[in-house]
Image: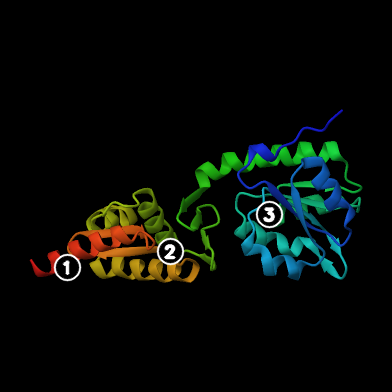
Amino acid sequence: MEVERIGDIVESPYTISLDDDPIPAKIIEETLGVKCFSFARSDDLLRNAKRFEPMGAFIDIYLNGECGLDVVPTVRTLWPTTAIIVMTGDPDDNLVGQALASGADDFIRKPISPPEVLARLKARVEDRKDKSSYNLLKFGDIRIDLRNKSMSGLKGNVFLSNKELDLLAKMIRTSGVVVPKAVLKRELWGRTTVSDNALDRKIFEVRKALKSVSEKVELQSIYGVGMVLRLRTFEHDREILEDIDSKLQFS
């Protein structure tokens, strides 16, 4: 009986395999009907990880002189929506707990079988899709993981403080709209009275974080009005905003 394909249920139809044995990657690719990019060493995977956003990652625990679990926290941060499944032929049940604690979503024992690969990945992909709708925000080339308090983009990944996260989340949810600073202060501190300098410091930190991960997204100040999150590639919008800013300064 032909195995069901799942490439049509995700936006990024490929998987990643970290295993010094090439056989599992071939089984995964043939079973799922999508490309599986295979890596034999963890340093090779991590060096290229920012280029990928797989629907699933299959990571072997025991590599040549390495432990696959060591890379799971890093790829979990880089790939917040990816279903991470750990593989091993070791019968030790304690490894299951270690794998899940490190950030993996599931566990498969070797030798892997096509039906189990399909069933486990499909279930975990659906789980990740449900979770991401609550925990993940996207704008331009950046994505914010609210659960892990991190921001990732084409240039890298950074962690954010609670206030920085709240500020950026507010700006993403109102992207393209100029938000008054009074509204931002109320969003971040509620009824607590804080100085304008306190907000300005958070804005500075968010701008620095954006610059470290993205070449497209910027938090722009509209003098006397408020803040707006925008894409640098929208040149027409840039000209309009700069014109408004200029008029406000000299009015």
Q: Could you tell whether 21 is left or right of 196 in the image?
A: right
Nearer the observer: mark 3 or 1; the answer is 1
Q: Could you tell whether 125 is left or right of 215 in the image?
A: right
Q: Amino acid at mark 3?
A: Gly
Q: Which residue is mark 3?
A: 103
Q: Is residue 129 above or below residue 175?
A: above
Q: Which residue is mark 1?
A: 246
Which secondary structure, mark 2? loop
Residue placed at 29% from the left, 68% from the top?
200
Where residue 237 appears, x then y in whole percent? 29, 58
Q: Amino acid at mark 2?
A: Lys
Where residue 82 appears, x then y in whole percent? 65, 50
**Of label 3 and label 1, which has the lower sequence position?**
3
Packing grade of label 1 (10 A; few <14, some 14-19, many >=20) is few
**Of label 1 and label 2, which has the lower sequence position?**
2
Q: What is the count of numbered marks?
A: 3
* Quadrant of the image occupied by residue 250: bottom left
**Of label 3 and label 2, which has the lower sequence position?**
3
Relative depth, front residue between 53 and 61: 53
**Tag shown at residue 216:** 2
Packing grade of label 3 (10 A; few <14, some 14-19, many >=20) is many
Q: CA distance from mark 1 to mark 2?
A: 22 Å
Q: Is residue 126 above or below residue 164?
A: above
Residue placed at 35% from the left, 71% from the top?
204
Relative depth, front residue between 1 and 196: 1
Quadrant showing the C terminus: bottom left
